[in-house]
Amino acid sequence: MQYVSTRGAAPVLGFEDVLLAGLARDGGLYVPKSWPRFTEDDIRAMRGLPYSEVAVRVMLPFLGGAIAEDEFRAIVKDAYATFDHAAVTPLVQLDQRNWVLELFQGPTLAFKDVALQLLGRLFDHVLAKRGQRVTIVGATSGDTGSAAIEACRDRANIDIFILHPKGRTSEVQRRQMTSVLSSNVHNIALAGTFDDCQDLVKAMFNDTDFRDRMGLSAVNSINWARIMAQIVYYFVAAVALGAPDRKVAFTVPTGNFGNVYAGYGARAMGLPIETLVVGSNSNDILARFFASGAMTAAPVVPTISPSMDIQISSNFERLLFDLLDRDGAAVTAALNRFRAEGRFEVTQAQLDRALAIFAGNRVDEDATLATVKAVWEESGYLLDPHTAVGVASARGIATDPTVPMVVLATAHPAKFPDAVEKATGRRPALPPRLADLYEREERLSDLPNDLAAVQEFVAARARAAREAA
Ligand SMILES: *Cc1c(COP(=O)(O)O)cnc(C)c1O
């Protein structure tokens, strides 16, 4: 299996190099040169299999032999053993038509665990084989840092440093990060804002000498292996609902377009997906694109579904590559125009091709809260605000009523208790695995908003650096 960059000017790479590279050298994102295809019989044969076995079958073609099947099976089983539910991603019925696919049964209660639990282990495996170490650095406003920490904790060849703005995350968010006491996990409480944290991380990557000495790397949402891991649950859910002999539709609460792009991949691999509904909150750049064919920048507004508060969806570039007939120069031109003018558009024919698969919908704050309340009253099921955007998007769009609709549930309601309580009057309890979170010991380091101080801190602790010295 070979991977090409969406900008067309980076080397073609195999799986291991794509995994470790993340972003392509031309600034593009890696995608498979061609999608592996499953026959209807292949898909039928997935019925009744455990999650990890479907995962091995779906992902193996993407590895191109880089990891032996038995070794890969062991890695996959180990990754999903960290989940709280035997089905890993259980399906729950909401009403006669709509189902919820719970992607939040992992260690940090959000769907990013599904990809990151595997990614951390894949990194470690490939690094061990190559005798290398990496230093992961990242910034978080509170929401996603814990998933990266849980992915990297105790990995033999990875050290992770996560910067969060001191005093500006919720207590649950901070404790989910700082109560991980593994020696390779370093939480930095920065005297500054989230933007300061991001600027420092960028500055560390831009310091090429520092970057090379530390073996800096990232596990961000553009990494191909994250998409690959997310394709699996589309197969698991669709097969449980009758695929390939029955079509299935999905609705995805969307931010960076990674999750819904994985659904596009599953469809390209032969899964009979009727529609992919892209659910947006008030940050509706994608909904406006699907309505008009124009991508137009707008300022980010904070919402009660903060993981979807984005200005530009980085993974959309992967879809754009296909809409522009895999012409890397055309993708580069469109994105340069977006950077310069805050806008690019596709032709009506290109938009029509997207609309044959995707539909966009936008849900505002009131409708999100009303949906949390309505579903609680109808079914006694608590939705988190991100999933509620999904349910409202699914219900607000006309699709074939005989096709089951699966809404991806991207966070546990206890992760966003204030919004849930506001809508229903009920404060969701943390699941047993986190019930003692408030009693756990914390470890974190206070640092000033100063690049030299942060670099010194990292250099003193990163094992990759000690080896090079
Ligand atoms: C990251 C995230 C999303 C958005 O997923 P994308 O792949 O970025 O579209 C939605 N909901 C939650 C809870 C998330 O953490």
Image (tube, grey):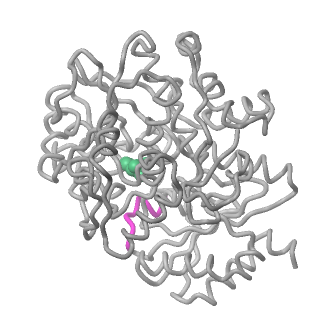
Q: Is residue 304 left or right of residue 199?
A: left
| Quadrant of res 168 | bottom left
Query: Where the C terminus falls, by quadrant?
Result: bottom right
Stretch in magenta:
168-175
In the image, is residue 352 above or below residue 147? above
Number of marks drawn? 0
Q: Quadrant of the N terminus?
A: top right
Majority secondary structure of magenta residues: helix
Whether residue 250 is situated above or below residue 43 in the rendered picture: below
Along the viewing direction, whichever of 35 and 75 lies nearer the viewer: 35
Magenta stretch containing residue 45, yes or no?
Answer: no
- Picture coordinates of residue 279, whole percent (x, y): 27, 44
Residue at image point 30% right, 45% down? 351
Q: Quadrant of residue 69?
A: top right
Nearer to us in this view, 334 or 80? 334
| Residue 155 x, y percent position in the rendering | 73, 53
Is 433 situated above or below 124? above
Residue 160, percent across and down?
Answer: 65, 64
Q: Residue at x 17, y 34 (%)?
A: 397
Q: Residue at x 15, y 39 (%)?
A: 373
Q: Residue at x 60, y 60 (%)?
A: 23
Q: Tell me: 324 left or right of 355.
A: right
Q: Is residue 451 above or below residue 201?
A: below
Image coordinates of residue 453 in percent, x first then y, are 62, 88
**82 and 361: which is toward the camera:** 361
